[in-house]
Image (cartoon, rainbow, N blue to C red):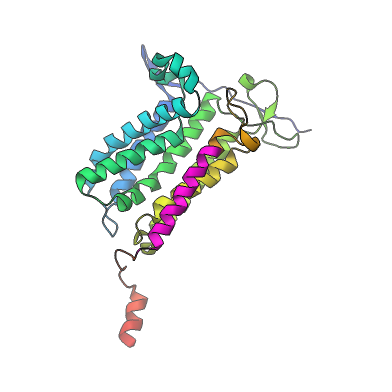
Amino acid sequence: MLPVLMFPQFDPVMIAFGPLVIRWYAMAYIAALVMGWLLVRKMVYWPPQAATSLQVDDFLTWATLGVVLGGRLGYVLFYQPHYYLTHPLAILQLWHGGMSFHGGALGVIIALILFTWRNGLSFLAFSDRVVVAVPIGLGLGRIANFINGELWGRAAPENLPWAMVFPQAGSIARHPSEIYEALLEGVLLFALLLFMVRKDSVRAYPGLLSGGFLLGYALVRAFAECFREPDSFLGFLAFGTTMGQLLCVPMAVSGIGFIIYAYRHPPIYKPLMTQHEMTQHEGG
């Protein structure tokens, strides 16, 4: 049996100025929104142009509201509806935690629909650029979960060298599932989407990137849930699944639907020929 790691007991408060307290979890949201905003500002000009930088600036407010309101209401409705129905004021206590990514995603989708309709933009073309930035928030959010010592993993095998004891979860060595999710939902998914969005052949099919994100997230989240301890107030559901896995099903179906829709429509533009292709064309 290998020695296990002890959770380092980070302070969840990043900065405190008297009554003003900034937590790592809040900073993760702020940093993700700012970095995502800067990235989308650049990507919207890649052909076919999906928006202007000024419109991206305006959408930042919409996205913030979608993430916060959707994430909180999603947690309330998906995870603890009975508790919050009897304690409605607790819904406003965001500092106690409780955010759902699936709810936040739904909130951002609604914000995208309303914003693109109001500004006369293509919903699919604009959302294809926005989804590329979403894994930044996912990765930083999971790191914040780890700093808070929450959402820990299931019991780990005795020979797992990075098994960790979370004091709040007892003396059992567990998977640091927050790190797994940060790597899968954050790093891996971001690298894949960034690789795809750089390709003209992908951007030419509106909805393809949005579908790829929805399907990709559903797959990696469902896999990561195999190592994450289910919420104590829910436990395992039908067939040994978790709430996170069940919520991934409609997400995966929607992603496949977007991909099929994208490929069933002709590309909206033809990428410029490369120098090699131009040489071949002139030679012919």
Extreme-top residue of the structure? 18
Above or below, 185 against 274 in this view is: above
Q: Camera-side residue: 10 or 55?
A: 55
Residue 253: within the magenta? yes
User: Is residue 31 placed above or below 53 in the rendered structure?
Assistant: above
Specify the farthest residue to the bottom.
Answer: 284
Q: Position of residue 246 (x, y in %)?
A: 54, 38
Query: Of all residues shown, which one is farthest toward the right?
Result: 1
Q: Which residues are magenta?
A: 246-265
In the rendered image, residue 224 lying in the magenta stretch gets the answer no
Using the rendered image of the protein, determine whether residue 140 is visible from the camera's viewpoint: yes
Image quarter in which the N terminus is found: top right
Query: Considering only vertical position in the picture, is 266 above or below 210?
Result: below
- In this view of the protein, which residue sits in the foreground, 33 or 3? 33
Residue 247: x percent and y percent? 51, 38
| Displayed quadrant of residue 71 | top left
